[in-house]
Image (cartoon, rainbow, N blue to C red):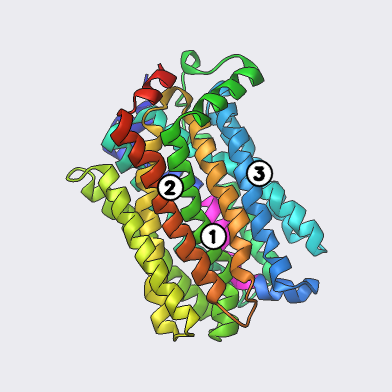
Amino acid sequence: MRTQALTGKPQSRLAVGIVLGTITAIAPFSIDMYLPALPDMAADFGASASFTQLSLTLFLVGLALGQLIAGPVSDALGRRTPLIVGMTTFVAISLLCALATSINALLILRFLQGLAGAAGLVIARAIARDSFDGPELTKFYALLTLIGGAGPIVAPLVGGQLLLFTSWQGVFVALAVFGACITFTVIISVPESLPQQARITGGLSQSLSTMTRLLQSRDLLGYSITQGLMMGGLFAYISGSSFIMQDIYEVTPQTFSLLFALNGSGFILGAQGAARLVSRFEERSLLLTGLIISSGAGIFLLLGLLFKASLYWVIPPLFLTVFSVGIISTTSMSLALQKHKQSAGSAAGLLGVIGMLFGAAISPLAGLGGSESAAPLGLVIAACSIGAMLSYLLLVRRLERSIGYAEDRNLNA
């Protein structure tokens, strides 16, 4: 059984795709919109830059763990109710973030905000998997990326402009308003995509059994690590770029927002390029191409930052890095979920949790140079890109060539 809203008329599919894509934009908006305010937040709380950056790290940890919870819950209870509950909770916690009076309170609230916002991220992907297969799934994920990918472009611009007439607290109020609008739209326009007979029963034990089975799928694990390393490099850039560009290269918050938005457009171009080419080339070939571009850009960036090159040297490889993430995230997500239709929520949750945990663990490393050196950022991005390519080649590509997925067919039988 397929969801009529997604597989019926093209305009209906587009409408629901816009809603789902906007839901996935919750994460980049929650991350990117407050980036221009990080230096101001550090000054207000009397905290160091690295300690303030923990607000991003803990949000990512919450986003990771939340996906691990929301995915299996949506497999058991359906997609719609957990999605609405998660989004409503996100709105409430965003308002509490604006009222935080200490950096410690903000750190706790950011963790809870990520935990709640994860429901939208993972369930939107699961709804898509309920409805499509093969290249059509890749194309629909690209549609989600096109809409959700506007977040990294629009969010820092909105955040930079908000800071012209309000404080960082106003940024969190704006996030609450954004979340409330999405929640209302979901209530009136997103139908249930998982029929009762397709839901997983058996409670916690069955959920744990499903996760165990998914972890035994070597290709899913390989895609998860590959995507996780790319997310680690991406979030290192996200967390470190504000301090590096404003403190080292001495650009204004508004200029930083424009540069960040420029790089963010690369994500959309990469995802849409993959969607256009998937009918002509294999998804695996597109994924490998993205990994090669990312590795080359990472090395180029590292050399530039080591030798303290100008901003004109640094921006192109950063753009290519984000561009390649658009290719890699779209193709790897589609390839990973195509074999796991009956547990799409759990599989999407597993992919998400590994990606976000990598991001949470790796992103603080970009700030090791403080406001004195940007070299750690280049080293992290280069290492993550090369590591992601090795993960794909060793864990996924080797499996494809040696046993032709026989092991995973037995696991999924």
Residue named by callout 1: 235
- The answer to which of marks 3 and 1 sits earlier in the sequence is 3
Which quadrant of the view contains residue 367?
Answer: bottom right
Inspect this view and state whether residue 186 appears.
Answer: no
The residue tagged with tag 1: helix, strand or loop?
Answer: helix
Q: Bin the neighbour count of mark 1 within 10 Å (Cα to Cα): few under 14, some 14-19, many 20 and up.
A: many
Which image quadrant for residue 313? bottom left
- Answer above or below: position of 76 versus 146: above
Q: Which residues are magenta?
A: 25-37
Residue type indicated by callout 2: Ser
Can you give x and y, in whole percent of width and height, for residue 90 in the image? Answer: 65, 46
Position of the N terminus by quadrant = top left
Question: Residue at left 45%, top 30%?
Answer: 217
Q: Which residue is mark 2?
A: 391
Residue at 50 percent of width and 46 percent of height: 23
Q: CA distance from mark 2 to mark 1?
A: 19 Å
Determine if residue 413 is in view: yes
Q: Is the residue marked by circle 3 packed among few (<14), some (14-19), or many (20+) residues within 10 Å?
A: many
* Circle 3: residue type: Leu
Disc with the residue nearer the chain's start (2 vs 1): 1
Give the mark toward the camera: 3 or 2: 2
Cα separation, mark 3 vs mark 2, equals: 28 Å
Residue with the mark numbered 3: 115
Give percent across and percent down for residue 163. Answer: 62, 74
Q: Is residue 80 above or below residue 397?
A: above
Foreground: 167 or 279? Answer: 279
